[in-house]
Amino acid sequence: MKTNITVFIGSILLLLCSFSSLVMAQNKMKIGERIIIGNSLTYIWETNDLIPNTYQEFTWNKNIAVNLTNTLYGGISYQNLFTNGSIVSANQVKNRYYLAGVFVQYDFLPAKPNRLIAELSWNVGNYCTCGDGDPYEFVNANNNANETLNNSNVLNYIGVGGSYEIMLHQFLALELGFYNYNILGDVKEKYNYTQYIIGLNFDIGKW
């Protein structure tokens, strides 16, 4: 029930964001006139004074956004997460995870080449930030060959965040941002996954 309510609220937020932007925006650009290909990196580490080890997390985010109006953008993203080490053991454990999703962005500076954006996204993946130990690959305890997709080894996330993109060249921009992902559903001891991003974007089209 809680999952259904959260899904409903997230869907309403997406619809409201899209609708309000479409209505209020001055359509100075036609759909698809500006395409932004994003490429960002994140490195996070954590230590434990009681264990001679370090947990390291490296994220590579690839995304593409297309303008729907002069202020509203829609797009898709795929994140590869690579982890190494641990904060609960001395083992040098290496793992890989993923997050894939769709997003809408609102640009507060439509008249300028730089972008100041707010983003709302819906994502699926297998990266479980749960419990007091290291993040791990999510495995549904109720999953078996007869279960449906809703009980598969996939997590759903609502993501919110924002970033500032500074044009370095006619087609190249530096992006600095911060994002937060909230795991949906009844997952024990879950907590939000947050990350900063530093990226280089290829900005194609009119602005």
Image (spheres, rainbow, N blue to C red):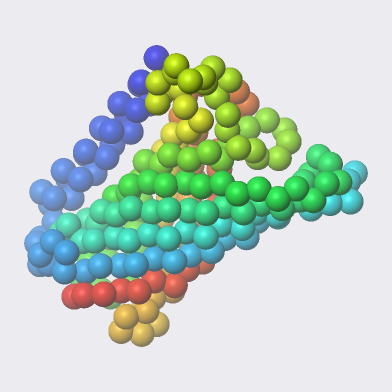
Q: Is 36 on the left-hand or right-hand side of 91? A: left
Q: Is 108 on the left-hand or right-hand side of 149? A: left
> Which of the 4 image quarters holds residue 15?
top left
Query: Is any part of residue 191 visible from this angle?
Result: no
Tell me what residue is drawn at x 47 percent, y 46 percent. 99
Tell me what residue is drawn at x 44 percent, y 72 percent. 200
Q: Residue furthest bottom?
A: 169
Residue situated in front as seen by the camera: 188 or 177: 188
Q: In which quarter of the image is the N terminus?
A: top left
When the figure is inspected, residue 125 is found, relative to residue 178, above or below; the finding is: above
> Percent position (x, y) of residue 201?
39, 71
Q: Is 175 on the left-hand or right-hand side of 70? A: right
> Which of the 4 image quarters holds residue 149?
top left
Q: Quadrant of the C terminus?
A: bottom left
When the figure is inspected, residue 54 is found, relative to residue 144, above or below; the finding is: below
Tell me what residue is drawn at x 29 percent, y 54 percent. 75
When the figure is inspected, residue 120 is found, relative to residue 34, above or below; the finding is: above
Q: Residue furthest front?
A: 145
> Percent position (x, y) of residue 189?
62, 26
Tell me what residue is drawn at x 10 percent, y 65 percent. 30
When the figure is inspected, residue 37 is found, relative to residue 81, above or below; the finding is: below
Residue situated in front as seen by the camera: 117 or 139: 139
Residue situated in front as seen by the camera: 151 or 46: 151
Query: Is any part of residue 142 visible from this angle?
Result: yes
> Percent position (x, y) of residue 136?
64, 38
> Percent position (x, y) of residue 117?
34, 59
Number of marks in the rendered image: 0
